[in-house]
Image (tube, grey):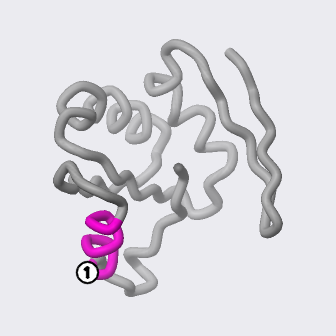
């Protein structure tokens, strides 16, 4: 596994690159998610291939997860879908990209 540090003006984070990371995502994210919630944005081909693996890992780690599948298109579609997502405090999730 390779760890790549990323620094932006607003925050720093680490990107992990390697084989089998989706199956272990719950272990890694469980250490950094304060509220044990995640929001996953995906497109149909990626969801079909990888969503079960990721969702199983997150669930096994006790991370409540919502999955939003967006049509294949630009990031603009993701923003349009996101605007419709519930904003109540009970549905807020940390976003991990």
Q: Nearer the viewer, residue 1 or 56?
A: 1
Q: Nearer the viewer, residue 70 or 96?
A: 70
Region of the chain picked out in magenta, as a range? 76-84
Q: Nearer the viewer, residue 58 or 7?
A: 7
Task: Indicate the position of residue 54 as horizontal and vertical percent values.
Answer: 37, 33
Position of 16 with respect to 7 (left or right) is left
Q: Residue furthest bottom?
A: 88
Q: How many marks?
A: 1
Task: Indicate the position of residue 73 as horizontal and vertical percent values.
Answer: 24, 54
Q: Residue at x 26, y 57 (%)?
A: 68
Q: Quadrant of residue 46?
A: top left
Q: Residue at x 47, y 59 (%)?
A: 37
Q: Read off the residue under disc 1.
A: 84
- Helix, strand or loop under label 1: loop
Position of 9 with respect to 77 (left or right) is right
Q: Residue at x 38, y 84 (%)?
A: 87
Q: Quadrant of residue 12?
A: bottom right
Position of 19 with respect to 91 (left or right) is right
The chief SS type of the magenta part is helix
Task: Indicate the position of residue 15 as horizontal and vertical percent values.
Answer: 67, 36
Residue 42 sits above or below residue 78 on the image: above
Q: Residues within 10 Å of mark 1 (few under 14, many from 20)?
A: few
Q: Residue at x 28, y 53 (%)?
A: 67
* Image quadrant occupied by the N terminus: top right
Is residue 83 shown in magenta?
yes
């Amino acid at each position: 596994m390779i760890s790549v540090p990323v620094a932006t003006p607003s925050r720093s984070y680490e990107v992990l690159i390697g084989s089998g990371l989706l199956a272990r995502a719950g272990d890694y994210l469980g250490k950094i998610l304060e509220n044990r919630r995640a929001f996953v944005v995906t497109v149909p081909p990626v969801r079909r291939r990888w969503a079960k693996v990721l969702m199983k890992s997150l669930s096994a780690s006790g991370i409540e997860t919502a999955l939003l599948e967006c049509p294949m298109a630009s990031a603009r579609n993701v923003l349009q879908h996101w605007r419709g997502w519930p904003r109540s405090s009970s549905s807020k999730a940390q976003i991990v990209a």
